[in-house]
Amino acid sequence: MTGKKNHDTLLQLETAIVKVLKTIYDPEIPVNIYDLGLVYEINIKEKNTVEIVMTLTAPNCPIADQILAEVKNKIEFLDEINECNVNLVFDPPWDQSMMSEEALLELGML
């Protein structure tokens, strides 16, 4: 695959992944995890293995396992993805400044 084709394919795949992430919500906040700023990195590796580096709004989130499983399952449901690994981190800690403008508007914070 040429460099441009490979770049375009990766860009399309990342766009599809972001679209999926925008369907996953923190049940306590009516905003998706992507716009909340909980997703720090999307790494597409060899053989379309994806690594998601993300955090939660609080380290003691009672449904952390449910959110992480939903991320993994929904991304692996994409035809192009062979595997998804979710890496949960708390450094840097999440804060409201990481939210998108859309999320801030949704929550009446702008």
Image (tube, helix red, strand yellow):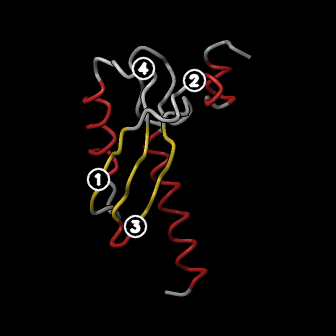
Mark before the other along the chain sequence, 2 or 4: 4
Q: Quadrant of residue 45?
A: bottom left
Q: CA distance from mark 1 to mark 3?
A: 14 Å
Q: CA distance from mark 4 to mark 3?
A: 28 Å
Foreground: disc 2 or disc 3: 2
Q: How many marks?
A: 4
Coordinates of residue 53 in the picture (x, y in percent)? 43, 45
| Between 70 and 57, the one nearer to me in the picture | 57
Task: Residue at 51% x, 36% y: name it.
Answer: 34
Amino acid at the residue labelled 4: Ala
Tag shown at residue 5: none
Task: Residue at 57% x, 71% y: name it.
Answer: 8
Coordinates of residue 60 in the picture (x, y in percent)? 33, 18
Foreground: disc 1 or disc 3: 3
Q: What residue is disc 1 on?
A: 76
Q: CA distance from mark 1 to mark 2?
A: 28 Å
Foreground: disc 1 or disc 2: 2
Amino acid at the residue labelled 1: Glu
Q: Quadrant of residue 63?
A: top left
Mark before the other along the chain sequence, 1 or 2: 1
Instruction: Judge whether 84 appears above or below 65 on screen.
Output: below
Left or right of 98 on screen, residue 81? left
Q: What residue is disc 4 on?
A: 58
SS for dot 2: loop
| Between 13 and 92, the one nearer to me in the picture | 92
Tag shown at residue 95: 2
Mark before the other along the chain sequence, 2 or 3: 3
Task: Residue at 61% x, 15% y: name it.
Answer: 107
Mark before the other along the chain sequence, 4 or 3: 3
SS for dot 1: helix
